Image (cartoon, grey):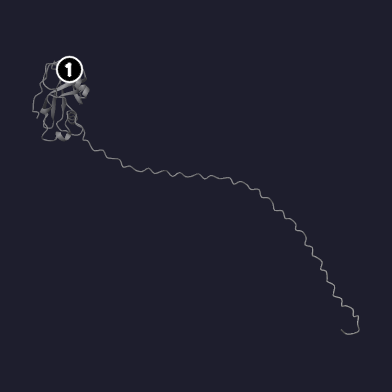
Amino acid sequence: MAKLGSYQPREKVEVPDNLYFAQIKKIELKKWSEENITFNWTFEICQPPFLGKRVWVWGTTGTVPTPKARLTAWMSVLGYGREQLVSDEFDTDKLVGAYVKILLKTWEKESGGTKQGVTDLLPMTDVDTQVLQGFLAQLPPAGPIKVAVQASAPVRAPVAPVYQQPVAPVVAQPIVSVPVPSVQVTPTVAIPSAPVVAAPVVAAPAPVAPKRTSSFPF
């Protein structure tokens, strides 16, 4: 664990605000008061034009890893999740010697004047690591290069979406007025019937009794 120590200023070197590759040299616990305890971080810039010149810059974090704390953000870049920070296994000494990418920035102090320090740690990409190795190759060998790897968020198994059969929309069929063709009706013409002529009744003549030619009754 980081131990209580005193701040030891080094020779002042003008370093412009910028992004730099740096190595963590020290993490010290500083107790300003009973309520104000911080971690003081010391970084050595590891790229031209400061490569190999022992140019150091500093940053400060709190000691409580709240969700939005700078300490939590920095430790995430260095490969530690918040759950690990609150455990007894966390040890800042394990971070010493790791290479990171820092943001050096100058800001206005409330009491007046300006102050410069490390405000952010940024994740190292594969390209960053290759560039850093090229810089360090210009220095005498110093053992394996320990590059900080950002902690990944817990991976959750994807939940398969529930497929719902799409329902076909009900389309109202338009009512189409079909024109009814007009049918021409031929008027019925009454054909006069031929008059019924009653046939005349001809009376048949009564039979004529033959005349008697004899005086006898037979």
Total number of numbered discs in the rendering:
1
Task: Judge by depth and name the residue closer to the eye, 39 or 205.
Answer: 205
Residue 132 in the image: above or below residue 208: above
Residue toward you, 80 or 166: 166
Q: Position of residue 35 (x, y in %)?
A: 13, 32
Which quarter of the image is occupied by the N terminus? top left
Instruction: Kindly give the residue lying farthest to the bottom in the view shown.
Output: 216
- Place residue 170 in its image quadrant: top left
Which element is circle 1 on?
Answer: helix
Residue beneath disc 1: 135
Q: Residue 166, image x and y in percent?
A: 37, 42
> Where residue 116 sits: x, y (%)?
19, 21
| Residue 114 visible in the displayed image | no
Is there any visible trace of residue 135 in the rendered image? yes
173 vs 54: above or below: below
Q: Establish if 80 lies above or below 115.
A: below
Which quarter of the picture shows residue 47? top left
State the residue in front, 37 or 50: 50
Apparent side of residue 8 relative to residue 114 in the rendered image (left or right):
left
Using the rendered view, name the quadrant where residue 51 is placed: top left
Quadrant of the rendering where the C terminus is positioned: bottom right
The residue type indicated by label 1 comes to: Phe
| Residue at image point 13% right, 26% down | 40
Q: Residues within 10 Å of mark 1 (few under 14, many from 20)?
A: some
Percent x, y of residue 37? 12, 30
